[in-house]
Image (spheres, rainbow, N blue to C red):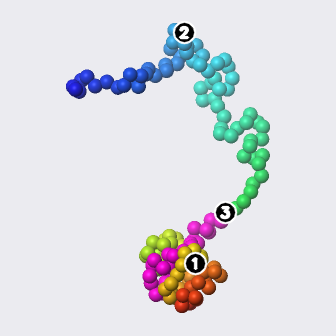
């Protein structure tokens, strides 16, 4: 094989469509834009969602739901996470160092997923009712 003999596969390359280049091209005169009207003009079109003056879909439908921008400060961890972590005392800083919660987290809650066998003392961390029972059953405690 020589570098000067390398070619793309047959049919891989094709000529670009050249509009407005005479009658013989098949796309001369109006250049495939039809006759008159807003869409035939250069720079003439409408904004996204515009429906010719009819009330657009995004304005016809009712607004629904809400997502608080404060949710980024909340985080959850599981009983299984506490088991793997293996610390006797757990606080927000320890969870951030371990990478179990994000850097923005301010409020952390333990949820009852997985099992916990070690006694863990939680400082400044909340828990659901089921998780609280499981932590206390394993000999753990909570501190405000």
Instruction: Look at 54% across and 90% down and name the residue there.
Output: 139
- Does 82 appear in magenta? yes
Residue placed most toward the observer, 140 or 17 = 140
Instruction: Look at 36% across and 25% down and name the residue there.
Output: 9
Q: Position of residue 35 (x, y in %)?
A: 66, 17
Q: Is residue 23 visible?
A: yes
Q: Position of residue 128 (x, y in %)?
A: 63, 79
Classify residue 141 by image quadrant. Answer: bottom right
Q: Are marks 3 and 1 in contact (CB under 8 Å)?
A: no
Dot 1: element: strand
Binning the other alpha carbons within 10 Å of mark 2 as few (below 14), some (14 to 19) or many (20 upward) gives few
Rounded to the nearest whole Å, what is the CA distance between mark 2 and mark 1?
73 Å
- Indicate which label's residue lies in the foreground, 2 or 1: 1
Residue at the disc numbered 1:
110
Instruction: Look at 51% across and 76% down and name the residue there.
Output: 80
Classify residue 137 by image quadrant. Answer: bottom right
Instruction: Look at 50% across and 88% down and name the residue there.
Output: 119
Binning the other alpha carbons within 10 Å of mark 3 as few (below 14), some (14 to 19) or many (20 upward) gives few
Q: Are marks 2 and 1 in contact (CB under 8 Å)?
A: no
Residue at the disc numbered 3:
67
- 43 above or below 123? above
- Does 139 appear in magenta? no
Left-right relation of 133 to 94: right
Q: Is residue 106 visible?
A: no
Residue at the disc numbered 2:
23
Q: Position of residue 13 (x, y in %)?
A: 41, 24
- In this picture, which residue range is highlighted in magenta? 68-92
């Amino acid at each position: 094989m020589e570098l000067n003999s390398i070619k793309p596969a047959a049919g891989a390359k094709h000529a670009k469509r050249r509009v407005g280049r005479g009658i013989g091209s098949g796309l001369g005169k109006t250049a495939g834009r039809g006759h008159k009207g807003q869409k035939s003009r250069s720079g003439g079109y409408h904004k996204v969602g515009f429906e010719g003056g009819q009330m657009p879909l995004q304005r016809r439908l009712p607004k629904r739901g809400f997502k608080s921008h404060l949710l980024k400060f909340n985080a959850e961890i599981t009983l299984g996470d506490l088991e793997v972590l293996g610390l006797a005392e757990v606080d927000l800083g320890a969870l951030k160092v371990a990478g179990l919660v994000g850097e923005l987290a301010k409020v952390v809650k333990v949820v009852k997923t997985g099992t916990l066998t070690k006694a863990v003392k939680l400082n400044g961390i909340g828990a659901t009712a089921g998780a609280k029972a499981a932590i206390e059953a394993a000999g753990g405690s909570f501190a405000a």
